[in-house]
Amino acid sequence: MTALSNKTLELVKSSMAEFVSYWEENASETPVDQLTDPITGRPELRNAETAMEMLYNYIEERGPMLCGRDFKLLAVEQPFAVPLDEARPELIYIGRFDKVFKYQGRIYIGEHKTTTSYKKDGPFRFDFVESFSPNSQVDGYLYAAHLTYGDAVKGCWIDAALVHASVHDGFRFIPIDRHLEQLTGWVWETRYWISQIEANASAVDALRSERPNIPYMAAFPKNTTSCTNYGGCPYLDMCKMWSNPEHFEEPDGFAIQKWEPFDELELAKAKRVLGIDRKVKRRDVLYDNTRVQSFRVCPRAFYYRHIRHFQPLGDRRALLFGGAWHRAMDRVWTELSGGVK
Ligand code: SF4
């Protein structure tokens, strides 16, 4: 660690406090300072010590840009809501920009991402860097940004941060720009996926009323190429055992917990929601990237999570660390830039 100014040290302390408070608010049983996995005994990368080292280096690296005269922070954790279909005004795509900023005269969306996808001299693996283009979340956010800020929007910068046992200065902006035609294509694709979700949901309703004893569920087909991705699907045992999941209640290890994007984005409390000239209501038909992406990955997993509302119990460390890093970034960006203007 190099010699640090008092200002940097103060900011490390305050952003670290934000990191820890997020962790403590959201973890049910996983301490932030745990250094090894209690089951495997392997070193646990995502912990408070790693976060502290990363914050020192991040503040030193990003400071010159965020403090610069040509940088202006426009919004932090800004909710947006944009229409998807003129014929269905109640159909709305919602999300939240991590940051909106003006840099050298152009407007950008900033999205923080943490990853363990390390490559020597990278610091990120090629597949991680390439995963943002094309990418339905980035495309959707750029579509919303263009509707909100018009031609002043230059693109989205992924603010990537490496989580690693010994490399704590792996940061990189990954700039993504999309043509307007590509964003219009995203709207068509998103409407297509929503129509598939709605058709499958209607099929489940019809099965419940007309064929409740059918031995298999003729809706929300399984995508078995996704079962082992990202550490394994939490619904694997159900898919192994159940032919028609409609006949079963949630198993041990799961709770019924509805994913409510309206509440997740705190739309009721938001002082301002970009992109729409009316209040977003709970009864609107709301889709966010999480729901659409879940269906695309596996329709049956979507059914478990968003039709039956099965939520796996227990903490997921990668999500905790990512969420805590976001909270710390809000403090770092706000302090270094002098606040939202
Ligand atoms: S829900 Fe989908 S991804 Fe998960 S185990 Fe079943 S088929 Fe595989």
Image (cartoon, grey):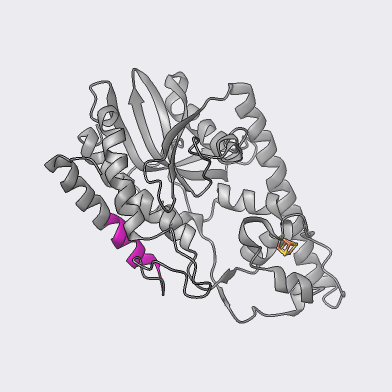
Q: Is residue 312 left or right of residue 272?
A: right
Ligand 1 is found in which quarter of the picture?
Answer: bottom right
- Quarter location, residue 238: bottom right
Percent position of residue 300, x then y: 73, 61
Identify which residue is drawn at 44% across, 30% down.
148
Which is nearer the eye, 84 or 320?
A: 320
Quadrant (top left, top right, bottom left, bottom right) of the N terminus: top left
Q: Is residue 322 left or right of residue 206?
A: left
Percent position of residue 242, x then y: 78, 75
Which is nearer the eye, 307 or 62?
A: 62
Percent position of residue 308, x then y: 65, 69
Q: Is residue 171 left or right of residue 258?
A: left
Quadrant (top left, top right, bottom left, bottom right) of the C terminus: top left
Identify which residue is drawn at 68% across, 47% down.
194
Segment tinted magenta in the rendering: 18-29
- State whether residue 286 appears in this view: no
Residue positioned most to the left: 6
Q: How many numbered dots are placed on residues in this image?
A: 0
Name the dominant secondary structure of the magenta segment: helix
Q: Is residue 6 magenta?
A: no
- State whether residue 295 appears in this view: yes
Q: Is residue 114 above or below residue 107?
A: below
Identify which residue is drawn at 71% across, 73% down.
237
Identify which residue is drawn at 27% across, 31% down.
66
Percent position of residue 241, x then y: 78, 76
Q: Is residue 246 above or below residue 290?
A: below
